Amino acid sequence: MNRIRMIRHGRPASTWGDSDPDPGLDPAGAEQARAVAGRLLALPEGERPSRVVSSPLRRCRETAQPLADALGVPVEIDPRVGEIPTPAALDAEARPGWLRQAFQGRWRDIQGDLDYVAWTRQVAEGVASHPGAAVFSHFVALNAAVSAATGDEAVAAFRPDHVSVTVFDVVDGALILVEKGQEASTQVL
């Protein structure tokens, strides 16, 4: 199966700028993880993911674990579907402002020590390398994959809600967007 479902992690126990750089899920996020696993398991045979892939960060791994447990498979870690790299010169306190500014522009305009257009391609290649999988990732990485699939240059091409499921097909090694996941009803991430 060449279909991939990319899922944003559940609600984390802390947010940008908090002291924990790698938070797990809060109780609502843990419930969201169980609920999205149930939705994915309810897909018809042949459409149900057979593999589970996650960003290395704890909130994604914890969101992926209920599905992996139900399928009886390990959670495969792939750093290519991880969080957007922050410029080395920024500390944790400056990261939220940098992200807010990035969300208002295009990939090529992001200030930092990385080629963020190339980063979107790396995310898309990472996602595309897991046909048949559920890939648990982040708000920005989801936008990177959607941008690579559609050619949209906006960093915030859409606002995926926690545990929203975005569907891609892989055709000749490239991502094709089938359906965007549910969008958040608020501007706050």
Image (spheres, grey):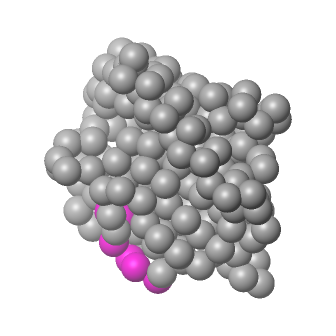
Residue 115: tell me if it is visible: no
Residue 44: tell me if it is visible: yes
Q: Nearer the viewer, residue 119 or 161?
A: 161
Residue at 72% across / 43% down in the picture?
A: 52
| Above/below status of 176 relative to 71 | below
Question: Which quadrant of the rendered structure holds the N terminus?
Answer: bottom right
Residue at 47% across / 23% down in the picture?
A: 30
Q: Position of residue 32 (x, y in %)?
A: 44, 32
Q: Nearer the viewer, residue 25 or 23?
A: 25
Q: Nearer the viewer, residue 130 or 86?
A: 130
What residue span does the magenta drawing correspond to?
151-156
Q: Position of residue 124 (x, y in %)?
A: 62, 66
Q: Report the magenta stretch's main SS.
A: loop
Q: Is residue 73 left or right of residue 57?
A: right
Residue at 54% across / 45% down in the picture?
A: 39
Q: Which residue reaches farthest right?
A: 73
